[in-house]
Image: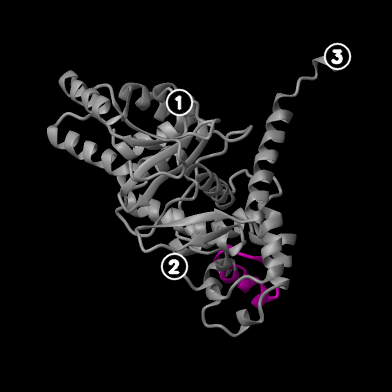
Amino acid sequence: MKEALVQWTLLRNEDYLSECLGFDIANKIGQEITTDYGRVDFILENRAQQHLLVELETILNTQNKLDNCFKQIVNYRNVRFTKDTKYCILFAKETPKNRISQIENFGRKNEILIHTYSLDNVKKLYSDTIQRLSLNVGLALPSPRNYTVCFLRWLNKILKPFKDSNRNTLSANELFNLYSGGTTNFNCYKRLALDFEMIIEEKNGYTLTEYGEEYIKNFSPYVYHSDNVSSVVLTNQQKRLLLKILTNGNWEDKYHKINIYWFLRFIEITDGSWLPLHFPFDQNKLEIARGLFKVTYKHRTMKEFLNWCYNYCEELGLVERIKSSSDYDCLVLTPLGIDVNNIFSMDLSLKKSRMNLSFKYSE
């Protein structure tokens, strides 16, 4: 198990981490903090406002690993955000005994706290944490699905044929021919329209819903003059409509809505600290995303899925992106995004309560 995955697990299981460190954790001051003396793994604070700077390691089974660890923690003694700061090496107790003796001797000589954790326990905690975080508040939703749809504004293309023909119902052949796209793309666009309840699929074809009619009424004027209607941005009225549909509590087979829900959970769980810009990206991050979404996507598919979900949320004003020169951008939920995420949680919790409601007291 790699160090990044161990760190992710420990920081989301503070009771176990506190027990390992013998430190009553009140706050996490920061993690992966870049300093003039190297990148600090994480810093914790207790209720007495004492800080503990932690150098995290897995199994220290070679002299080279030990030397590097010792050098880092000595350098980190130059880093402090409060006068009352202590320094610690936290490593896997599966480390060979002769190496543990070296580490303990180093700690005594240099006034460095030495603590261990069980790698086996962390592996189990990782599985439990993924399971816990992937559970919805109240009701289980299906896993997300990846479609080759990059933007919600692509609804313009699948709905414009209804406007052009001045009809509310089109046969499958009519819609496909007026759409002027390949079969695979057509099915993806159609799925988007079905998921956002713009059309319903019937025996005689596809019929606009009230939502679909309202969406078309609020087309941007550019839709009628652009050679690429999929590139025309959503109007404010269309955004409001999509937000209304997104939060109306109708989840059944609505995979794009489900994708947005899961993506907001992804931002919560990862603190919005990484959105991959390239592939392949860090294997540990891929494993975290796979565990959360319960999928087996490879690097490219996961990178595309996350970035497309970001596009949907950005179009609706749910997230802001902090661009970086590294391999990952950061994401922050907007106040609207926080509200929508809370609505999702409350809606799912209410559904669970209704399902479990006992009427025995009324008998």
Instruction: Assign the magenta stretch its main secondary structure.
Output: helix
Q: Is residue 160 magenta?
A: yes
> Is 223 rendered above or below residue 143?
below
Report the front residue among 167 and 258. 258
Percent x, y of residue 188: 50, 59
Q: CA distance from mark 2 to mark 3?
A: 58 Å
- Image quadrant assignment for residue 233: bottom right
Q: Which residue is mark 1?
A: 23
Please give the name of the residue rendered at 71% of the width and 61% of the height, measured from the top-left corner.
Answer: 241
Q: Which residue is mark 2?
A: 182
Report the front residue among 270 and 34. 34
In contact (CB < 8 Å): disc 1 and disc 2:
no
Percent x, y of residue 192: 56, 58
Q: Which residues are magenta?
A: 156-173
Q: Which kind of residue does numbered mark 2 sit on? A: Gly
SS state under label 2: loop
Q: What is the crowding at mark 2: few (fewer than 14 residues within 10 Å), some, or many (at least 20)?
A: few
Left or right: 309 in relation to 166: left
Percent x, y of residue 11: 44, 34
Q: Which mark is residue 363?
A: 3
> Is 20 rendered above or below residue 219?
above
